[in-house]
Image (tube, rainbow, N blue to C red):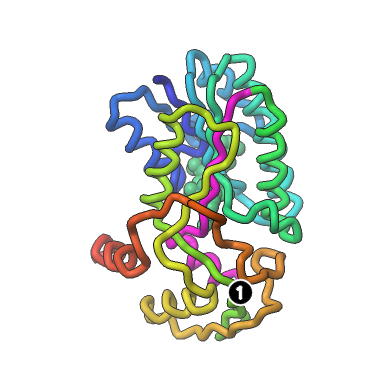
């Protein structure tokens, strides 16, 4: 198959490209750095010629409310229109578990808009909903930092490694479109504030996490179950300890 991975240079995209290429498919890593831009349309029509499946794992360069919404709306609209012209048979997109419950957040309003465009388009699709990546824990800590403390909700999360996410996205890409959403999560359910404290301690980061039920997660106040999957998610194999140990080894 010819597969175009939009955001193919990113954390998840680069892993998806490697996995699918290793199986012998013709895989193109597409992103602004390689001349394909879903916002300006540059290179889009050309790269999609003869493409069977498009995988969209791009992300907004800015997390500011208005910028995120504009990114996912414009990118989704341009990409799906170009796919329709090229006769693409399957659109696979990566989004976040609980997106539909998180409209209070500017970032998630962007993801809701992206998913709405996919569902309204005539192209068959599979949306993969993932929980938070272990690799994103530093970003979550940063988002809640006030001086020496980090204010975070104690809501439950079930974080996952980018490796397991990429494997699930690759599987969805090679499977038939489900015209629906599949959920993936890590093996352990833990409170967000506890998880980030564990991460900071392991990193020898002196910041202390303050658990606060009203602390907002990228603009949204959370209830316990908002970020965790429903029934029968795909469960990744890598837990926090295994992931952290492998990260440490990779940087030594
Ligand atoms: N972080 C989490 O915990 C989490 C959880 C669940 C789902 N997700 C979703 O996972 C997806 C991928 O995240 P990630 O962390 O892998 O992203 P990332 O590492 O930040 O990579 C973003 C990618 O998007 C590309 N991109 C940016 N602007 C573009 C444009 N105008 N046209 C085409 N490509 C563009 C970038 O290309 P350049 O390198 O050329 O700039 C890069 O390849 C996102 O949609 C996010 O919502 C994230």
Which portion, as a residue range, is magenta?
Answer: 123-144
Residue 117 left/right relative to 152:
right
Observer able to see residue 122: yes
Note whether 151 is above or below 183 in the view shown.
Answer: below
x and y percent of residue 25 in the render?
Answer: 34, 24
Q: Nearer the viewer, residue 225 or 43?
A: 225
Q: Residue at x 51, y 86 (%)?
A: 208
What residue is drawn where x is 33% and y is 63%?
Answer: 243
Q: Nearer the viewer, residue 126 or 45?
A: 126
Determine whether, in the image, residue 191 is placed left or right of residue 251: right
Residue 171, placed above or below residue 191: above
Q: Quadrant of residue 170?
A: top left
Residue 54 magenta-drawn? no
At mark 1, the secondary structure is: loop
* Image location (x, y in percent) of residue 17: 38, 35
Residue 14 shown left or right of residue 55 in the figure: left
Q: Is residue 243 above or below residue 163?
A: below
Q: Which residue is mark 1?
A: 144
Residue 10, compared with residue 242, is above or below; it is above
Mark 1 CB in 8 Å range of ligand 1?
Answer: no
Does residue 32 appear in this view?
no
Kindly identify the residue that appears in the image at 49 percent across and 36 percent down: 33
* Percent of width and height locating residue 108: 68, 53
Q: Quadrant of the C terminus?
A: bottom left
Instruction: Name the residue furthest front.
Output: 231
User: Residue placed at 50% from the left, 33% from the top?
Assistant: 55
In the rendered image, the quadrant that contains the N terminus is: top left
């Amino acid at each position: 198959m010819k597969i175009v991975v939009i955001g193919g240079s990113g954390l998840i995209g680069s892993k998806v490209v490697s996995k699918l290429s290793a199986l012998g498919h013709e895989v193109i890593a597409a992103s602004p750095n390689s001349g394909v831009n879903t916002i300006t349309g540059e290179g889009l029509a050309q790269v999609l010629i003869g493409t069977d499946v498009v995988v969209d794992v791009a992300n907004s360069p800015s997390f500011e409310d208005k910028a995120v919404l504009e990114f996912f709306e414009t990118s989704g609209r341009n990409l799906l229109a170009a796919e329709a012209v090229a006769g693409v048979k399957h659109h696979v997109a990566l989004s976040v578990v609980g997106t539909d419950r998180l409209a209070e957040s500017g970032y998630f309003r962007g993801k809701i808009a992206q998913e709405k465009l996919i569902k309204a388009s005539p192209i068959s699709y599979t949306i993969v909903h993932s929980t938070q990546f272990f690799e994103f824990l530093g970003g979550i800590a940063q988002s809640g930092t006030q001086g020496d403390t980090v204010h975070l909700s104690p809501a439950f999360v079930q974080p996952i490694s980018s490796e397991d996410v990429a494997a699930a996205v690759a599987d969805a890409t090679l499977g038939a479109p489900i015209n629906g959403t599949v959920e993936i999560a890590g093996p352990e359910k833990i409170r967000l504030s506890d998880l980030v404290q564990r991460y900071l301690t392991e990193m020898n980061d002196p910041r202390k996490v303050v658990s606060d039920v009203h602390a907002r997660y990228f603009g949204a106040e959370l209830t316990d179950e908002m970020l965790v999957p429903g029934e029968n998610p795909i469960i990744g194999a890598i837990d926090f300890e295994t992931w952290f140990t492998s990260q440490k080894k990779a940087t030594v």
